[in-house]
Image (cartoon, rainbow, N blue to C red):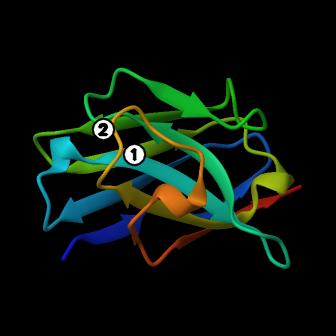
């Protein structure tokens, strides 16, 4: 059983920064594609970023390109999301997710097999 535990959420003013972390256990971490999704109140869950098994290939939603950076540490079994220049519209619950069958990364919700419990990010104007 793969377990994902997010941390690092909180409240920040617009223009500020936060770093989210996701610790992964129960799987060979470097065999797993990792992604971040978010869900704002009353909206569907949406893709934020993904990172390939080796960490070389990274994909981002257009709404976060240039502001967010995804990274992974295959020794510590950790994936992180550095979020800069935050906007009120970034307010959401952020989830990390693991795709056991992927290689390069995916923006599709249905490709991910395991999910964390989520961490709240609130950006005030």
Q: Residue at x 81, y 47 (%)?
A: 87
Name the residue that disc number 1 marks: 80
Q: Residue at x 55, y 31 (%)?
A: 59
Residue beneath the point at 42% across and 23% down: 57
Disc 1 is placed on an element classified as: strand
| Residue 7 seen in render | yes
Locate the N terminus by quadrant. Answer: bottom left
- How far is mark 1 from mark 2, CA to CA? 6 Å
Could you say where residue 91 lies in the image, as x and y percent from the top left? 75, 62
CB within 8 Å, label 1 to label 2: yes
The answer to whether residue 9 shows anywhere in this view is no
Quadrant of residue 109 within the rendered picture: bottom right
Picture coordinates of residue 14, whole percent (x, y): 80, 47
Q: Nearer the viewer, residue 52 or 102?
A: 102
The one nearer the camera, 96 or 99, is: 99
Q: Badge 2 is on which residue? A: 72
Residue 3 drawn at (x, y percent): 25, 73
Relative to 57, 9 lies left or right:
right
């Amino acid at each position: 059983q793969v377990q994902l535990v997010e941390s690092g959420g909180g409240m920040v003013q617009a223009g500020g920064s936060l770093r989210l972390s996701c610790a992964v256990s129960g799987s060979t971490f470097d065999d797993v594609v990792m992604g971040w999704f978010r869900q704002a109140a009353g909206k569907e869950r949406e893709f934020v970023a993904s990172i390939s098994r080796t960490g070389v290939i990274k994909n981002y939603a257009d709404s976060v390109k240039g502001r967010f950076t995804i990274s992974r540490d295959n020794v510590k079994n950790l994936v992180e999301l550095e979020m800069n220049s935050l906007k009120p519209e970034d307010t959401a619950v952020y989830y990390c997710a693991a795709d056991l069958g992927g290689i390069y990364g995916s923006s599709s919700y249905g490709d991910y097999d395991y999910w964390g419990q989520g961490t709240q990010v609130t950006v005030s104007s």
